[in-house]
Amino acid sequence: MTFLAKPLSALVAAVSLLAGHAAFADVDAAVAKQIKAKLAAGNPQATFGDVRESPMPGLYEVDVNGGNVLFVSKDGGHFIAGDLFEVGPQKVVNLSEQRRGQHRSEVMGQQNLDDMIVFSPKGKPKAHIYVFTDVDCGYCRKLHDDVPELNRRGIEVRYLAFPRAGLNSVGYRKVATAWCADDPNKTLTDLKNRKNVPLKVCNNNPVAAQYKLGNEVIDVRGTPTIVMEDGTVVPGYLPPETLVKALGI
């Protein structure tokens, strides 16, 4: 018995016309214990979180491995790994993605800003974005060229490192050099502009931790990956005008 590592999109197409689905009722302690015990017996290596009533009657939600969600029967003997949708007037809402977005937003908000390379606007920012970046990808450079315009519009850009080739690559050494520099902002800019920067990797830099965060929590598939304040993930480049609209500025 194997639990899926990543959600399978559109595996569940469920209709829920209940209002106020975000307010979950407390689950009976005996039911929660039974569900978690049955799941743990099937896969002792997995980590299971809280048990909640799902918006679909008869199924319970259980977090697995820190982010994914299983929809489980009351006896814990059956589960569905996938996304739960709500069909409403003229729209379909992915409730599972909403929950993942909330989780991503909370996790990103818990990260230490001092471990990021931050480009801030003058005055108080109107909004911020997190960007998982590499120094060698073309669209990372294109987005970085937009940073002055984003700052001008009041958007703070918070960079996290994501060396696409992994932690044993030259790409890692390059991006770690920026995080280890006396002037990280200038060094990151120089590297993205293909200037000749001597590579120097310091101990205890946060690149490996940020790379792990991108892989295991945010599900970064490429760079740049933008994470909005509400936890929405944008894979790839967006021009400033589109970002401004998406942020509601």
Image (tube, rainbow, N blue to C red):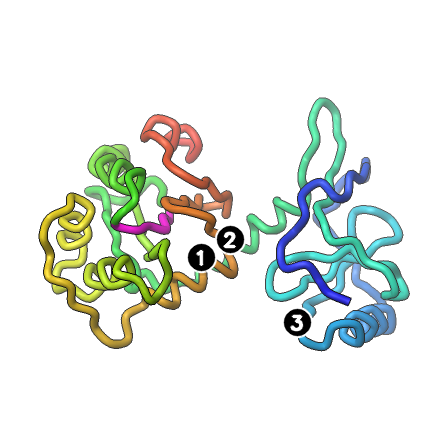
Q: CA distance from mark 2 to mark 1?
A: 6 Å
Look at 75% across and 45% down and name the residue there.
21
**Secondary structure at numbered mark 2:** loop
Tell me where residue 135 appears, x and y as whole percent.
Answer: 25, 50
**Secondary structure at numbered mark 3:** loop
Of residues 55 and 144, which is closer to you in this image?
144
Mark 2 and mark 1 residues within 8 Å of each other at the beta carbon? yes
Tell me the number on the disc at residue 219. Answer: 2
Give the labeled residue for mark 3: 47
Look at 50% across and 43% down and name the residue there.
232
Task: Indicate the quadrant containing the C terminus: top left, top right, bottom left or bottom right.
Answer: top left
Tell me where residue 197 appears, x and y as whole percent.
Answer: 11, 56
Look at 19% across and 52% down and name the residue there.
188
Q: Is residue 181 left or right of residue 170?
A: left
Q: Overall secondary structure of the magenta stretch? A: strand
As drawn, 25 above or below 152: below
* Residue 162 visible within the image: no
Look at label 2 and name its amino acid: Asp
As drawn, 156 above or below 5: above
* Residue 238 visible within the image: yes
Q: CA distance from mark 3 to mark 2?
A: 18 Å
Give the labeled residue for mark 1: 214
